[in-house]
Amino acid sequence: MSLSTDDVKRIASLARIEIDDTQAQATQAQLNTIFGLIAAMQAVNTAGIEPMAHAQEVFQRLREDAVTEADHRDAFQAIAPAVENGLYLVPRVIE
């Protein structure tokens, strides 16, 4: 895919970007280089290659799933203004 200077100016206009002829030509060259790189990457045969979640073979270090805090639920509910069946009651804000 190749963009013309008119295409670049139209895209700039749609994006509400003011651009002169010199900037349009420079942008056209940069965008066409990017499109060339994309075309080269799409031409690579990737059949049989498994998708990767990361570019390197890294793994998330996981800690043991263990309770580290004491249960203070009863103490917190004892000082709450309104509690019912273990739930905090709050004033209605939307009618």
Image (cartoon, rainbow, N blue to C red):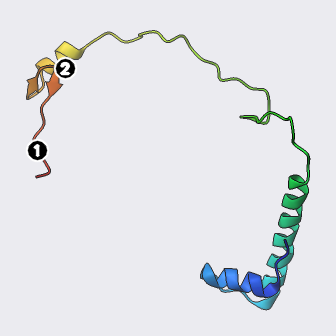
Q: Residue at x 18, y 15 (%)?
A: 75
Marking on residue 76: 2
Left or right of 31 on screen, residue 16: left
> Mark 1 touching mark 2, by CB under 8 A?
no
Callout 2: helix, strand or loop?
helix
Crowding around mark 2 (Cα neighbors within 10 Å: few <14, some 14 to 19, many 20+) is few
Q: Quadrant of residue 29?
A: bottom right
Q: Circle 1 sits on which residue?
A: 92
Q: Quadrant of residue 20?
A: bottom right
Foreground disc of the pair 1, 2: 1
Marking on residue 43: none
| Amino acid type, callout 2 | Phe
Q: Is residue 45 above or below residue 2?
A: above
Q: Quadrant of residue 63?
A: top right
Q: Residue at x 14, y 51 (%)?
A: 94
Which residue is situated farthest in the bottom direction here? 21
Give the quadrant of the N terminus: bottom right
Left or right of 14 on screen, residue 68: left
* Mark 1 or 2, nearer chain start: 2
In the rendered image, residue 91, in percent from the top left (x then y), is placed at 10, 41
Q: Is residue 90 above or below residue 14?
A: above
Left or right of 87 on screen, residue 60: right
Q: Residue at x 11, y 44 (%)?
A: 92
Q: Is residue 93 above or below residue 6?
A: above
Q: Residue at x 8, y 29 (%)?
A: 81
Callout 1: helix, strand or loop?
loop
Q: Is residue 66 above or below residue 52?
A: above
Crowding around mark 1 (Cα neighbors within 10 Å: few <14, some 14 to 19, many 20+) is few
Of residues 62 and 8, the one drawn nearer to the viewer in this rendering: 8
Q: CA distance from mark 1 to mark 2?
A: 21 Å
| Amino acid type, callout 1 | Arg
In the rendered image, residue 39, in percent from the top left (x then y), is placed at 87, 60
